[in-house]
Image: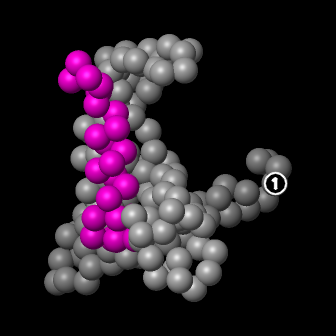
Amino acid sequence: KVSSANYVQSKYVRARTLMNEITASVTTTTANPLFDGAVKQMYMDNGLRGGLPNILGDVDEKSQMSNADEDPRLKVYHTFSRIHGDLERDYNAFMIDPTYYSQGPGNYRDVAQNRRNDVIFYPRMGGFDVKQFLSYIQADGYE
């Protein structure tokens, strides 16, 4: 399939379409097209680092008008979410122990920092990010 005609072109078009869909909510039109592009790029970067939230559980008209704090049937799931750093960079020493309660440097502050878009663009999340961040802090103060 990779060697078929127009495969690369079709994947390029799909990638551009997906990027435009993800950044549509921050479309900015100013006299400076470089600024407009920078706004989209910053939004995309933060989304890929902290994740893009999806509200799951829109089961009826009432829940579509509620946020995740008001309706326990609504759940928040972040797509594209990852912990701080790039896995391929050797200075990011990732060690995830195969234990039920994983320990170690998760850098959840960085994930929360990269979810700052959520407050404005996804108000239906309610206090989800704050609650999740606080749930990662251990009794000894480490995350």
Residue 52: x and y in percent read 44, 57
> At 48% across and 21% down in the image, what residue appears?
101
Residue 98: x and y in percent read 56, 15
State whether residue 139 appears in this view.
Answer: yes
Residue 63 included in the magenta stretch of the image: no
In the image, the segment drawn in magenta is: 119-143
Element carrying mark 1: loop
Residue 136: x and y in percent read 34, 33
Give the answer, above or below, for where 5 lies relative to 95: below
Residue 127 included in the magenta stretch of the image: yes
State whether residue 46 appears in this view.
Answer: no
* Mark 1 burial class by Cα count in 10 Å: few <14, some 14-19, many 20+: few
Residue 120: x and y in percent read 27, 70
Question: Residue reaching furthest left?
Answer: 31
Give the answer, above or below, for where 128 lies relative to 125: above
> At 57% across and 85% down in the image, what residue appears?
61
Give the answer, above or below, for where 81 lies relative to 19: above
Foreground of the two, 30 or 101: 101
Which residue position holds label 1? 4
In the shown orientation, is residue 121 left or right of residue 74? Answer: left
